[in-house]
Amino acid sequence: MINFDFNTQERANIHQAVFQSMETFIENTGDLEVASKLNISEIREYAEQFDFNQAADPMTIISTVINGLKKYAVHTPHPKYFGLFNPRANFLSTVADYITATFNPQLAAWSHAPYAAEIEQFLIKEFGQKFGYQSTVIDGTFCTGGAEANLTAMLCALNHHFNDFSTKGVLGMPKRPIIYCSSESHHSITKAAKTTGLGTASVVTIPVGMDLRMDTNLLIEQIESDKKAGYEPMMVVGTAGTTGAGAIDNLSVIAEIAKAHQLWFHVDAAYGGAVAISPELSTWIKGVEQSDSITLDIHKWFSVPMGTSIFLTSNKKILHQTFGVSTKYMPKDGDPEKITDPYIHSIQWSRRFNGLKLYLPLAVFGWEGYEKIIRHQIGLGNALRTGLIEKGWIIENDSKLPIVCFTHPTLKGNEAAIVQITESIVNSGKAWLSVYPVREQSTFRACITNFSSSLEDVQELIDLLDFYRTKFLNS
Ligand SMILES: *Cc1c(COP(=O)(O)O)cnc(C)c1O
């Protein structure tokens, strides 16, 4: 018989070795190259080196895996990763993940993991209030990411709009439902339309103005012309912090339009929604309190490991209406009036206790601690803007969030140059940033996604940009 648990001494050895490696990574993340050069065949060979026909020594296997993760990855926890909202996971959230994995609570039925389920419901209520929902109407569920939360929103909208959607599905629809979002919104909306069976023809993107926010006059016109054409406007998605340039749609105006046309109003606040925890910064997303639902990624600005997002709704009944089923085999020993069984309340069935990754750091540092982290990153975003302007760069987006899209008079409109300079910086291993088109012209995009990034890191990015720009112009 093999011992899948190992014995006490072996476990101690593995724990210690892993602990030491993690400690080295946490202490010295900044010394690693942010990104390594990709050689597909080398990486594939490394991944395929183990022979499953043979047992092996766990320490060798673990250290091979850790080395691979060190060598072949973009290190999103690196302080000079100025990337795509991927955070450095805060320490307590990683501890939470380990505790979760070991206890492995099953959050399908409330009665199997009542404490874990209540922790998640508590977080849902707290966050609902931060967004300005009345405490009596708040409902929600943890999701694996913004994509799942946006899909949940679309399914809720469908069930709200079409009473018999649960039974008849898309075949029961008299007219094609239409979902509106801005041309800068996240493509998980389009993907949700594919998944729900509506198809991408049901998603209409509304152009943005010079400020990269949805043009709400065009939204009204589009709704009216779609109605005349025999379509069924059903849902509008406002984005609070677009993925590309950090634009925040005018949520109050969209809320009014949604009300006038009886559309489900969803706010995709995957990234920018974090400002809701600050009474002062939450004014940036005013109007969100009038929404029917909200997506908030926890694995972005709340700095926890991947797989954690929150879907919130101000419609108490809709999740059950959308996901309810009855089974003979699931335990039913909670009072359904008082408790919520997650499996009839969300897309997933067996569910990981993802809420602990948020609960632990929030309980230790409080809202105040999290607000400081958020303000620190906003401050660095402002410092990056100021520093770039001082060196003659031009900022192309006007977001208050720490996402900066910029170019230089000597490079404006020169897409090849911008791509090449970005690649040179990424290939140097010293920093990571990306290219994003603003008003159809390529810009450099740098986002502060890491609580451990400092002013020096920002200054180094500016120096790298100057260095490689000069080098490019002289080449
Ligand atoms: C990241 C993002 C998403 C997708 O979220 P995942 O967690 O990656 O699934 C959706 N909307 C916006 C605005 C985002 O920034």
Image (spheres, rainbow, N blue to C red):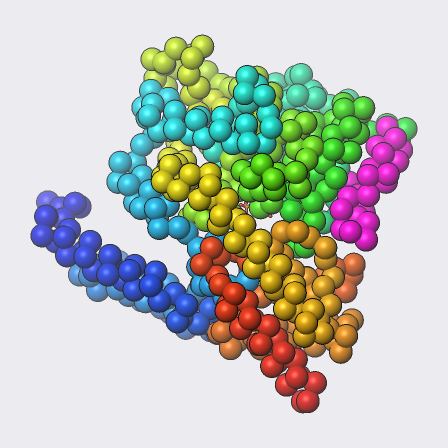
- From this viewpoint, is residue 120 visible? yes
In which quadrant of the rendered view does residue 60 lie? bottom left
Q: Residue at x 64, y 29 (%)?
A: 289
| Residue 2 showing in the rendered view | no
Residue 11 within the magenta-colored segment of the rendering = no
Q: Quadrant of residue 65?
A: bottom left
Q: Seen in the image, is 376 located left or right of residue 294?
A: left
Q: Is residue 259 above or below residue 74?
A: above
| Image side of residue 6 versus residue 408, left or right | left
Residue at image x 41%, y 52%? 89
Which residue corresponds to the image point at 54% horizontal and 38% vertical from the top-left? 277
* Residue 21: percent from left, percent from top: 27, 62
| Drawn side of residue 28 relative to residue 308, left or right | left
Using the image as rendered, state which of residue 374 and residue 41 is in the foreground. Answer: 374
Position in image of residue 20 (x %, y %): 24, 61
Does residue 126 lie above or below 84 as drawn?
Answer: above
Q: Against 21, is 207 above or below?
A: above
Q: Is residue 207 magenta?
A: yes
Q: How many marks?
A: 0
Give the residues drawn in magenta, as a range. Answer: 198-227
Residue 122: percent from the left, percent from the top?
A: 43, 26
The quadrant the C terminus occupies is bottom right
Q: Position of residue 317 (x, y in %)?
A: 57, 17
In this rendering, the answer to whether 325 lies above or below 199 is above
Residue 137 found in image quarter: top right
- Quadrant where the N terminus is found in the figure: top left
Residue furthest to the bottom in view is 475
